[in-house]
Amino acid sequence: MGWTSLFLNMEKKKVLIVGSGEVGQRRALKFLDAHSKVIITGGTVPEKLLKLGAIEKPVNEIEKWIKWADLVVVASGDNELNNKAALLGKDKLLNRADYPLEGNVIVPTSFFLGDAQISIFTGGKSPLMARILRKKIQEAIKDEDLLQIELQHYARQLLKDKISDQKKRRIHLYQILNNPDIIKLLNEGKLKEAKSQVREYLTKINGTTHGF
């Protein structure tokens, strides 16, 4: 299987959604959230999507809007329409909600936990299991894990200003990650105090003061 995961910056990119049903609406919301330009054709577009910036176009203009699009999403309940759109969009970025592996872009189950965005792709074998795995991951990741992300970002910025060697920075980041006092503070939701501990640690590394 030649698939690999990527994140694309879709801001201001042009997305055509073929189909305005449940799947098409979910896809439209995803790309509207990413600040894409979204046109929907093939069915009646809900008012809520129009208010968010989606534009409805008649299906008899589909060829025109496929030429316009950077990404074509095929998501209608009409097999004939889906196949026509896929054929017209074969040289574009193409996502097929009906037969995912026949396109060249997968829109996986994805969700945010704090600043962490997590995506799940089962190779098209089981969307149901993707949802179940999502629930298990959400239950496994704790608030303190999300605070650790914020703390690691904070520590990385401080280290980048003072230590040029990436390998040395990584050693210190692991030390911070496994520091029991810092872990205890994050478990208690005390991010500000944990940052103070990071600054204290960084002033003492290798017995020198780096001016943190």
Image (cartoon, rainbow, N blue to C red):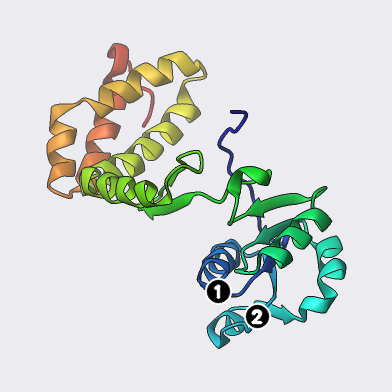
Identify the residue shown where x is 66% and y is 63%.
79
Quarter of the image for residue 179 reads: top left
The quadrant the N terminus occupies is: top right
Q: Is residue 173 above or below residue 184?
A: above
Q: How many marks?
A: 2
User: Residue 10: image x %, image y %?
Assistant: 66, 55
Residue at the spot of label 1: 21
Q: Secondary structure at mark 2?
A: loop
Left or right side of 144 for 59: right
Identify the residue shown where x is 56% and y is 84%.
46
The quadrant the C terminus occupies is: top left
Q: Are marks 2 and 1 in contact (CB under 8 Å)?
A: yes
- 85 or 40: which is nearer to us? 85
Residue at the spot of label 2: 43
User: Residue 57: image x %, image y %?
Assistant: 76, 80
Q: Is residue 179 above or below residue 168?
A: below
Amino acid type, label 1: Gly
User: Residue 17: image x %, image y %?
Assistant: 67, 67
Question: In the rendered structure, which disc, 2 or 1, sits on the residue that comes first in sequence?
Answer: 1
Left or right side of 192 for 96: right
Q: Is residue 205 above or below residue 3?
A: above
User: Residue 71: image x %, image y %?
Assistant: 72, 56
Of the numbered discs in the image, which one, if any, rests on residue 148?
none
Quarter of the image for residue 20 reads: bottom right
Identify the residue shown where x is 20% and y is 44%.
193
Considering every residue shown, the one lying at the far top of the view is 206
Amino acid type, label 2: Gly
Quarter of the image for residue 49 reads: bottom right
